[in-house]
Amino acid sequence: MLLTKYLDEAADPTLLDSEVTSRPEAAIGVLLLNLGTPDAPTAPAIRRYLDEFLSDPRVIEIPQVLWQLILRLAVLPFRPKKLVPKYELVWMEEGAPLLVYSQRQAEGLEAKLKALQPDIHVELVMRYGNPSIPAGIQALRDKGCEKILVAQLYPQYAASTTATAVDAVNRHVARLRNQPELRFIKNYYDDPGYIQPLAQSVRRYWAQNGTPERLLLSFHGLPRRCIEQGDPYYRECMLTASALRKALADTHVPVYASFQSRFGAERWLEPYTEPLLRQWAKEGVRSVHTMCPGFLADCLETLEEIQVECRDAFIADGGEHFGYISCLNDDPQWIDGLSHIVLKQLGGWVPDSDKKLA
């Protein structure tokens, strides 16, 4: 019995103090967290994913009794089937793009960190779906990680993304008897490790495709009331746009910001991406390139909503050239930037962490 062993050790005067009290240095874990995706491009898998995602009160902030009626009767019976062809369009051979690219980011990050300190381990998890938060935390604990940094793949903070992930991690850890030490990255909307790879990805795209009349940064939308209640998301999106505008100032291409993926009838953050593109086309703008800096891995919202639907809308109303600049995905410059962002948060856990990747 473990307790008997400890009592026997404490009573044995022949044991050296170091044999009783010393312990190996704990490994460090990084829980890389993204939103989530269905396990397959099928109606049942999409239904399971939407059920979990849309049942989160941080995501849908209306009385849950009312919302669950709407969700069960009007959304889940019909929406999954409509989404099947959209998911099939973007699905990769290895799986969902968001999962594939997020996993590549996790692998690249771990390789970078292990080159500096071998006892750092990285596990990818999703807030909704798989791989799950409990599974990721357990995998890190199995590797001896007593200190875990939660690094979310959300550059801008929002209660419906960042906060709900913090809630989920803490809920799981609250059930553990032996809890790890936790840290969380809140945001990095203007960190050079994030802005510079974005700017370089734009420059590479323009080197191959020429420069457009305008560059549009499309962020995921939020209801306006979320901002009115204190969510910093809008401000942080605008600071990202400002930082990227400065990084590309020498190109003399105007940089604009908009918001996509509206849901429901209430007013969301404006301008809305597709109506803005239609307006520009009608006003005579012929060439637009679009990127989604709030998404760090391509997914349905970027590959189908922007690259297909928004392109078609722009061309239909008179536009001539629409370019989509991919998310950072597994860009080596982004892996370097992410490593810098993570290391800055490991101060005290990793000696001289601020100098390791200098």
Image (spheres, helix red, strand yellow):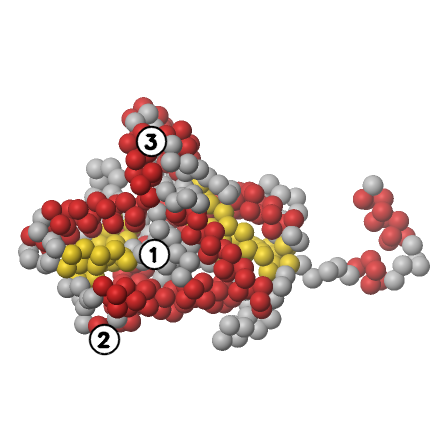
| Image coordinates for residue 132, horizontal then vertical, percent | 51, 42
| Image coordinates for residue 230, horizontal then vertical, percent | 32, 52
**CA gap, disc 1 and disc 3:** 25 Å
Three-letter amino acid code of the residue under disc 3: Pro
Q: Earlier in the sequence, mark 1 or mark 3?
A: 3
The answer to whether residue 80 shows anywhere in this view is yes
Q: Callout 1: few (<14), some (14-19), or many (20+) C-alpha neighbours within 10 Å?
A: many
Three-letter amino acid code of the residue under disc 2: Asp
Q: Which residue is mark 1?
A: 327
Secondary structure beneath disc 2?
helix
Please give the name of the residue rendered at 65% of the width and 49% of the height, measured from the top-left corner: 142
| Image coordinates for residue 35, horizontal then vertical, percent | 41, 46
Three-letter amino acid code of the residue under disc 1: Cys
Closer-to-camera residue (199/63): 199
Q: Which residue is mark 2?
A: 250
- Marks 2 and 3 close (CB-CB < 8 Å): no
Closer-to-camera residue (170/39): 39
The answer to whether residue 184 shows anywhere in this view is no
Q: Earlier in the sequence, mark 2 or mark 3?
A: 3
**CA gap, disc 1 and disc 2:** 22 Å
Locate the N terminus by quadrant: top right
Please give the name of the residue rendered at 25% of the width and 43% of the height, measured from the top-left corner: 262
Q: Which residue is mark 3?
A: 80
Closer-to-camera residue (166/254): 254
Please give the name of the residue rendered at 82% of the width and 63% of the height, measured from the top-left corner: 18
Classify residue 21 by image quadrant: bottom right
Classify residue 201 by image quadrant: bottom left
**CA gap, disc 2 and disc 3:** 45 Å
Secondary structure beneath disc 3?
helix
| Image coordinates for residue 60, horizontal then vertical, percent | 34, 38
